Amino acid sequence: MPHSSRHLAAIMFTDIVGYTALMDKDEDAAFEMLERNRAIHGEVIRKYKGKFLKEMGDGILASFPTVTDAIYSAGYIQRACENEEHLDLRIGIHQGEIVNQGDDVFGSGVNIASRIQSIAPVGGIWVSDSVQRNIQNKKGIEVEFVKEESLKHVKQPVRIYNVNVNCDELENDKKDLRKSHTSQALNRNQNSIAVLPFVNMSSDAEQDFFCEGISEEIINTIVQLPGLKVAGRTSCFSFKGKNEDLRQIGDKLGVGNILEGSVRKFGKRVRITAQLIEASTGFHLWSKKYDRDLVDIFQIQDEIGHEIANQLQVTLLGNTVAPKIREQTQDVEAFQLYCKGRSLYYKRGMALYEALRCFESALAIDPTYALASSGLADTYVMLSFHGYLSPSVCWKKAIPASQNAIKYGPDLAESSCTMALIALLHDRDPERAEIEFKKALSINPLNGQARVWYALFLLTYVQERFEEGIEQSRISIENDPLSSYAYSCCGLVLAAANEVDEAIEMAQHAVELEPNAMLPRYTLSYCFLCAGEYQKALDECQLALSSSNRHAWNLNLMMAIYMELGVAEEAQKIYRELEAMYKEHNAPPANLAIAAAAVGENDYALELSRIAMDIDDPYLPCKGIKDRSSKALREVEGIEKIFPTLRLSK
């Protein structure tokens, strides 16, 4: 039997009006029309990254990665047909699941697109409600409700909309875009930069955190400069300790300039050197040495930002723009503690506990330090989300810290991102969370945490706005091309959208970037599970377990794999392990609820789910209930009363 795969797609079905009559009247003319129709479709479908699935008589079936691509393609196809005598089309578009088996394609999504096409007017583009929801406010697209129709072999009536595509508006926009891209290509060396971690020239290894912090703050400062492309922190910091050729670094990060430097502390003095280098030639565009008192460290960061703006001639309306000064403590020791805390926070796992101590110590020195407050809140949220600490303990600390961050740092991306996490995970207010995520990204488009959480948890898991989630995930990779975290989360977004093949590719790339980390292995295992490749999923999950000290997420994933393989006794062993973890370590109930359902303990699973909601366990309502490994929990009778907004898709 041929291998089959399922994935979500925008499905377009087109049909030539009057073709049968023309075939009866003039067979040669009919075949000629068919050839012209194929040529038009082939060119436009390729242009919009679609796939020509098959031809059925005079009908053509195609799929697209996004609804917008399908709509634009349909618009241009109809536009091309205006210049072809007697070539009149009806077009129907639906977003749904399709099944590829061998060279053929099936699924209710194909049927719905075909049925919509059959009732569309000549020259019209009619779409389903699933398409209409994703094309609101898209440039050049006008949508109008037509009617609700009962379609053959479709259980529920389908709301149908007429779509008009203004190709002239799109063409003007593309001309402007082409000019912009040409300008960017010409100025790439001038307007793109990577800030490498500054080298610690002191004998104290602890000063590495201080050096990283200086580099990160420079990134956060210069990202404000309009027209300047800045590589993300994770990608830049991946070159730490490596003596790699600057030309190769420039190629890998897609930048034309590199800022590198060093820091030496001696007593209460500091010496910072910085060099701005053209990556392709190694030519030094600018260099400077700063010998200052430690208290001047923040002024030095701002000066470097100004110098970069001047040297790269980054302008807005013809005037060189100076970056704004970020809200910052004036205490160097507090700054050092914050830098160390953030570095540990990025590592996750048990490092989160040490990160807490760093943020708390920084706030003991400076209670108005907004960045330290956001770091403290974020860390407590992660400790709860990952199942290390009770949610009730974490929220008591995280919420006041987030309020402190906004109070003293209202214009910091970190503060808004923290508020978004609280709104999403504690308040269960996705609308407020979206406002805060967007604010954070408007302040700092490179804020990887805001971008990834917005894409994965809010857009994908909570609201199931898959196309937007995929788009935001791709932006996170574009910003930070060497970040395994960005690739892992993009893989999870794609898996949720049933784009399983691409999800696996993303996860494999994440593993290549960071083979010993938990999240890439977890993601790859999860994607293999979604694809039905259970042995591969098991192999990857075992690696994830060994690298994570048997993290509960991996245990749940392993249970799901064993159940698919029919090895119930192994799943039972893992269930007992999770049960002991819950009872002995006061672990949050979410993971045990998922496990209990997997082994048929349905009443206990419901009880644990109620407890999870009562104590605001962030994992279960945000991700756990939507996860592929929690399929059994979604099928427990009565679960919809606990999660009334849950879409019970199997």
Image (spheres, grey):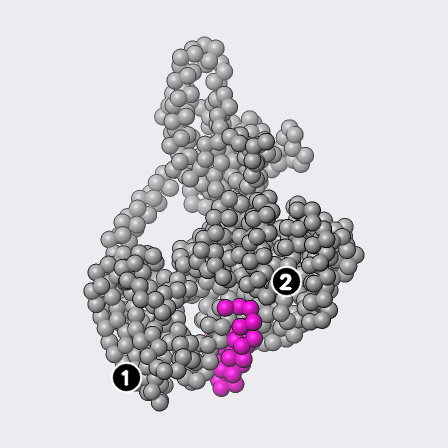
The boundaries of the magenta stretch are 347-376
* Residue at 52 percent of width and 36 percent of height: 11
Magenta stretch encompasses residue 355:
yes
In this view, 361 is above or below 14: below
Q: Main secondary structure of the magenta part?
A: helix
Alpha carbons under labels 2 and 1: distance apart:
50 Å
Kindly identify which residue carries mark 1.
291
How many C-alpha atoms fall within 10 Å of the one at disc 1: few (<14), some, or many (≥20)? some
Where on the picture, by quarter, is residue 266? bottom left
* Residue at 25 percent of width and 56 percent of height: 187
In this view, 486 is above or below 74: below
In this view, 64 is above or below 420: above
Q: Quadrant of the C terminus?
A: top right
**Position in image of residue 395 (x %, y %):** 63, 72
Can you name the residue that lies furthest to the right here?
603
Q: Is residue 206 left or right of residue 118?
A: left
Q: Amino acid at mark 1?
A: Asp
Q: Say the numbered circle drawn on residue 552.
A: 2
Q: Give the secondary structure at mark 1.
A: strand
Q: Quadrant of the N terminus?
A: top right
Q: Say the numbered circle drawn on residue 588.
A: none
